[in-house]
Amino acid sequence: MNTARTYTTKQLADLAGVSVRALHHYDEIGLLHPKRRENDYRAYGPDEVNRLQLILVYRASGMKLAEIGRCIDEGGLVHDQLVRQRERLMGERERLDGVIATVDRTIADLEGSTAMRDDEKFEGFKRGLVDENERKYGSEVRERYGNAAADEANERVLGMTREQYDQTVSLEADIKEALATAMATGDPTGSEAARLCDLHRRWLCRFWGESAYSRAAHAGLAEIYLADNRFRAYYDAVAPGATQFLHDAILAYCAE
């Protein structure tokens, strides 16, 4: 901002489109500290206005308040953080655009104005799967396996037929069911655990291709699952400790 104007809490709330209660909360948790006037009323100057803008940008992209404070306070990294946030938002927009396009074509098909090919009916969902995986795990996958392998996996998904896509989605559900069953035995080296790992291998090959699969790569992926909280959250939703069990089962399976 080029002005030294200060705002009361109510004025800034109206300007930013947030509630007074939200500004008070940000103050209480140390996320946005206004200055205090002689009468002890809050006063928001240019620095606080700029900081609030960043808070709202991060908030709109789905980041939690605790993460927002850390990102902003890293100072010089704010620009890089915003660039990454923009990339994630662009990916999400592309995914939604694909789904919207599929919905539009479906409506046209139902209305009889345009016939929809079978491959078009699933194009948006396949693109959504690719974009979501890229947004969540793309940087880690590309760092570990390289851009060529990541791009090939994406193209493999986009090239799936309807039957192949349905089978891939079904495999993912089968893996969760098999994980719960294997965990009930308490043995990551048993027959149920081996069946779980074989399902997981088949699912991976949907993305990697049979020729690219190796037990070493499979075991390496299990280590990523254990180290990354996002994977932990995904598999531990099946049952507490599921990620650890899957990790141990895959290592035993790959050591055979």
Image (cartoon, rainbow, N blue to C red):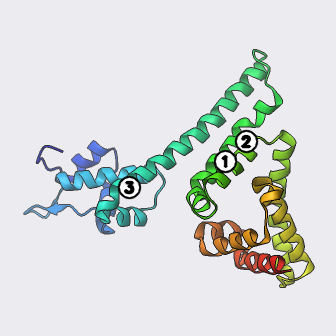
Image point (33%, 57%), residue name: 78
**Residue 90 location (% of width, % of height):** 51, 42
Mark 3: give few (<14), some (14-19) or many (20+) Cα within 10 Å.
few
Q: Which residue is mark 3?
A: 80
Q: Which residue is mark 1?
A: 130
Given contact means CB atoms under 8 Å apart, are the residues at marks 1 and 3 in contact?
Answer: no
Q: Amino acid at mark 1?
A: Val
Image position of 205 with respect to 182: above or below: above
Q: Check the picture and name the quadrant holding the N terminus.
A: top left
Residue nearest the viewer, comparing 141 with 78: 141
Residue nearest the viewer, comparing 16 with 253: 253
Image position of 205 with respect to 251: above or below: above
Image position of 213 with respect to 60: above or below: below
Element marked by disc 2: helix
- Residue 50, labelled with which disc? none
Element marked by disc 1: helix
Whichever of labels 1 and 3 marks the residue nearer the N terminus, that label is 3
**Residue 147 location (% of width, % of height):** 60, 53
Question: In 3D space, how far apart are the residues under numbered discs 3 and 2 (Cα atoms)?
Answer: 30 Å
